[in-house]
Structures are given as C-alpha cells and as structure tokens.
Amino acid sequence: MRRRAPRLFGLIVFLLAPGLSAAQDMMSNVNLSSPTFTEAEMTREEVAALLDSSQPPDLSLRRLNGLDLSGLDFSRVNLRGAYLNKATLIGARFDGAILDQVWALDSDWSRASLAGASLFAAQMRGASLVGADLSNARIAGDLMRADLRGASLRGADLSADMKNQSMGLMRAVLDSANLVDADLSGANLSRTRMKFARMAGVNLSGANLMLAELAGADLTGANIAGADFDRADIASAKLIDLRGADQAHNLDTARNADRAIRN
C-alpha cells in the first residue's frame, strides 16, 4: 500500500481540486469498502504507546480506520495520508498536527482540538466536528455534509490555494455542512464553497468572504459585522435577522444580491 500511496494521493488532489462533481467522481472510482479504507493495522494501545514516546511519532499513511482514539494527544504528529475513516476521536488533541491528504470519512472529532493543524486535501466528508477547535487551522479539503455545530474556526484559513492551480483550485468545500452557531470570526473564507450550508447564528465578524460561494446558504441571525462579501455569490441565501449588517462590507454589491432572501 505504501508504494501505491503517492499515485493514489495524486488522484485525490486532482479530483478534489475542481469541486463537487470531481469529488463525486472520486468516490465512484475508489473502492471505499477495501481493507485500505475499512481496516486498522494498529490497536489503540499500540497507537497510545507510540504517542507516549519522547519524540512525536510518524503516523503518515497508517491505517487507523474505525479505531476509538478518543482523548489521545496527537499534537504536532505527522498523520499525512493516514486512514481514519469512521474513527472515533472525541476530545483528542491534534494541535499543530499534519493531517494533509488524510481520509476521515464519517469520523467523529467532536470536541477535539485541531488548533493550528494542517488539513490540506483532507477528505472529511460527513465527519462530525461538533464543538471542535479548529482555530488558526489551514483547511482546504472536502467537508461536505460535515457537522460543525458550535465549532471554533476563529482565524482559520479555508481559502483557495492560489499558488498551485495546475491541478485545479484547492479550497475548503463545505456544501450542505452544518455550521450552526459556529465561530468563524476573522476566518479567511475567500473562494470557499458553502452552498446550502446551514449557518444560522454563525459568527462571521471580520471574516473574508471574497468570491465565496454561498448560494442557498442559511445565514439567519448570523453576525456579519466587519465581514467582507466582495464578489461573493449569495443567490437564494437567507439573509434574515442579520447582526452587524450595517458594518459589513460589499454585501449589497455581492453577486446575485438581488436574489438573496431578506427580511
């Protein structure tokens, strides 16, 4: 598996980059029922023993699918390309960890701390991050239908990677995600996709939403004080009972502003 990994990860990056249709193609071309995506090569006890060593272990490419790793401390650990599908990581710590290209479909990160972590090209569709701390994290992956209720993404960078477009536009995809009452204050959401996302009560104060895709998103009761909607697409977005709307920038000149749903 390790010899095939670079080619597989290249496929992941290529297919994730263009957007939703490519991500769907990826799911149809990868056998998610194979042992690589469903089995674990280590036990919780073995993982915990490695984490107790004097130096942060290298867990890149490791198959940890389905394990209950709740409460363990993975801070600054390299988990690049690891497989964590359906893993339980409740309350675990991943501060500063490398989670680039990780597979974590339908995994549970509730109340986990991922402050300052790197999640580039991460595949976390359907993951639960309820109450998780992703402050100052770098996120450019697939979080479609993820549950981020009450999560903290303060100062997080979910923007598109403009330095490497030969393989398409890499950015955070949060289509149909649940961001109710999440904190995205000061976050960089430039070009982030959040179509039909549930964002009632979300804190977007000071966030950069330039060219973000918010079509159909529900922002009822959101705090948008100081947020910049420069050229964001807000077609059919629910902009009801907004807080700080008088302090927002470029909201009335955003794309499809005339098609937004307002009070």
Image: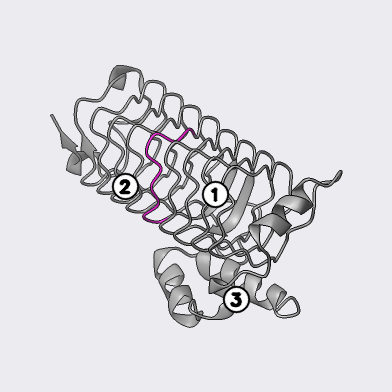
The mark closer to the camera, 3 or 1, is: 1
Residue at the (40%, 56%) spot, across then down: 144
Name the N-terminal-most of marks 3 and 1.
3
Name the N-terminal-most of marks 2 and 1.
1
Q: Position of residue 23 (x, y in %)?
A: 45, 68
Residue 89 tag number = 1
Q: In this view, which residue lies farthest toward the left?
A: 263
The quarter of the rendered structure image containing the C terminus is: top left
Q: Secondary structure at mark 3?
A: helix
Dominant secondary structure, magenta: loop
Q: Which residues are magenta?
A: 144-152
On whether residue 54 falls in the magenta region, the answer is no
Q: Nearer the viewer, residue 203 or 5?
A: 5
Spatial CA distance of label 2 from label 1 is: 24 Å
Which residue is denoted by mark 2 in the rendering? 197
Spatial CA distance of label 2 from label 3 is: 31 Å
Residue at the (48%, 65%) spot, across then down: 18
Residue at the (53%, 72%) spot, across then down: 38
Q: Secondary structure at mark 1?
A: loop
The quarter of the rendered structure image containing the N terminus is: bottom right
Residue kind at label 3, given as amino acid type: Thr
Q: Is residue 154 above or below residue 106?
A: above
Relative to 159, 235 lies left or right: left
Residue kind at label 1, given as amino acid type: Leu
Q: Position of residue 24 (x, y in %)?
A: 41, 71
Residue 79 appears in the picture as rendered: no
Relative to 70, 177 lies left or right: left
The mark closer to the camera, 2 or 3, is: 3
Which residue is denoted by mark 3 in the rendering? 36
Figure quadrant of residue 63: bottom right
Residue kind at label 2, given as amino acid type: Ala
Tell me, yes or no, whether the two marked residues, 2 and 3, touch with CB atoms within 8 Å. Answer: no
